[in-house]
Image (spheres, helix red, strand yellow):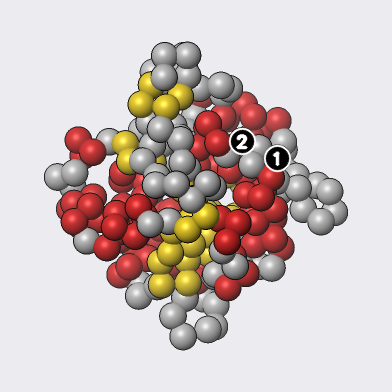
C-alpha cells in the first residue's frame, strides 16, 4: 500500500507593516515533493482556510525540481488544496509544513493545526517542517499538557538568518520562540543545508535544507511496514 503524506500550506500572501508579499517558498515545497514523488507516495495538500495558496520565489523556477513542481501535478494539486478542517488527517503516514514567510502569519496559533500536529505525533506518524514552517510546532501541546517542542532536537530559520532577511516584517523571532518552549535548537552556518530528525520529528533550517527534510522523512517511512 502506498504511503500517504499530507502537505499543509499557509494561505497568507502578505506579512508585516509594509505588507511584504509572501507565500510558500517554492523550493521548500518543491524539493521535498520531489523526494516524496520519487518514493511513490500519495501526496495531498491542505491549507488552513481552503483558499488558493500563494507561492513565493518564482524567480527560482529554473531549478529542475522547482520547474517540475510548477509544470507537473505539484502546483496544480496545491492550488486545489483542501480545507484542513475537511481532511481526515489520521489516514496519513506523515504531515509536512513548508516554509516561506507566510506561515508566520497564520500558523503561530491556528488551534486546528495544533490539534492535528499533536494527534499526528502521538499516533507515531511523522511530522516535518522546514525554514519558517516549524512555526507550526509552536504552542502544540501533547495529551500530557507538555509542549511538543520540549526536549526535542530541532532547527528552523535562525535568528542570524532573519537579521539579514525579514527582521522588520516578522512578528517575532522564530528561533527564540521555539527555544522558549523547550526546543534544543541546532543552528548551522547561515543558508547552509541543515536538517535534523529527532525520532519522527523532522525539521530543516532554510531553503537549502528542504531536500534533506524530504529525504529524512522518506528514510523514516521506509522503516515502517505498510
Label 2 belongs to which residue?
A: 108
Q: Residue at x 40, y 45 (%)?
A: 53
Q: CA distance from mark 2 to mark 1?
A: 7 Å
Q: Residues within 10 Å of mark 2 (few under 14, many from 20)?
A: many
129 and 108: which one is in front?
108
Coordinates of residue 122 in the picture (x, y in percent): 71, 63
Marks 2 and 1, the one that precedes in the sequence: 2
Which quadrant of the structure image shows residue 109?
A: top right
Q: Are marks 2 and 1 in contact (CB under 8 Å)?
A: yes
Q: Is residue 42 above or below residue 69?
A: below
136 and 16: which one is in front?
16
Helix, strand or loop under label 1:
loop
Q: Is residue 3 visible?
A: yes
| Left or right of residue 191, residue 15 in this image | right
Helix, strand or loop under label 2:
loop
Checking the image for residue 36, the label placed there is none
Label 1 belongs to which residue?
A: 139
Which quadrant of the structure image shows residue 23?
A: top left
| Left or right of residue 177, residue 163 in this image | left
Q: Residue lying furthest right in this view?
A: 144
Q: Residue at x 29, y 57 (%)?
A: 76
Q: Residue at x 22, y 61 (%)?
A: 72
Q: Residues within 10 Å of mark 1 (few under 14, many from 20)?
A: many
Coordinates of residue 180 in the picture (x, y in percent): 70, 30
Which quadrant of the structure image shows residue 102?
A: top left
Coordinates of residue 161 in the picture (x, y in percent): 43, 25
86 and 30: which one is in front?
86
Q: Is residue 131 visible?
A: no
Numbered circles on residues, count: 2
Coordinates of residue 42 in the picture (x, y in percent): 41, 72
Q: Residue at x 55, y 42 (%)?
A: 134
Amino acid at each position: 500500500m502506498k504511503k500517504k503524506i499530507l502537505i499543509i500550506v499557509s494561505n497568507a500572501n502578505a506579512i508585516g507593516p509594509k505588507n511584504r508579499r509572501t507565500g510558500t517558498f517554492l523550493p521548500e515545497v518543491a524539493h521535498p515533493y520531489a523526494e516524496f514523488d520519487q518514493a511513490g507516495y500519495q501526496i495531498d495538500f491542505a491549507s488552513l482556510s481552503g483558499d488558493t495558496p500563494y507561492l513565493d520565489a518564482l524567480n527560482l523556477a529554473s531549478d529542475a525540481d522547482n520547474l517540475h513542481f510548477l509544470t507537473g501535478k505539484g502546483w496544480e494539486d496545491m492550488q486545489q488544496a483542501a480545507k484542513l478542517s475537511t481532511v481526515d488527517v489520521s489516514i496519513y503516514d506523515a504531515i509536512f509544513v513548508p516554509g516561506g514567510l507566510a506561515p508566520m502569519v497564520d500558523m503561530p496559533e491556528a488551534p486546528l493545526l495544533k490539534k492535528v500536529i499533536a494527534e499526528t505525533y502521538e499516533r507515531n506518524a511523522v511530522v516535518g517542517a522546514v525554514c519558517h514552517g516549524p512555526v507550526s510546532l509552536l504552542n502544540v501541546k501533547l495529551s500530557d499538557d507538555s509542549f511538543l517542542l520540549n526536549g526535542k532536537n530541532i532547527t528552523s530559520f535562525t535568528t542570524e538568518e532573519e537579521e539579514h532577511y525579514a527582521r522588520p516584517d516578522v512578528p517575532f523571532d522564530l528561533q527564540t520562540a521555539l527555544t522558549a518552549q523547550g526546543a534544543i535548537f541546532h543552528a548551522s552556518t547561515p543558508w547552509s543545508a541543515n536538517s535534523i530528525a529527532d525520532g519522527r520529528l523532522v525539521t530543516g533550517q532554510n531553503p537549502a535544507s528542504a531536500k534533506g527534510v524530504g529525504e529524512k522523512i522518506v528514510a523514516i517511512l521506509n522503516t515502517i511496514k505498510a
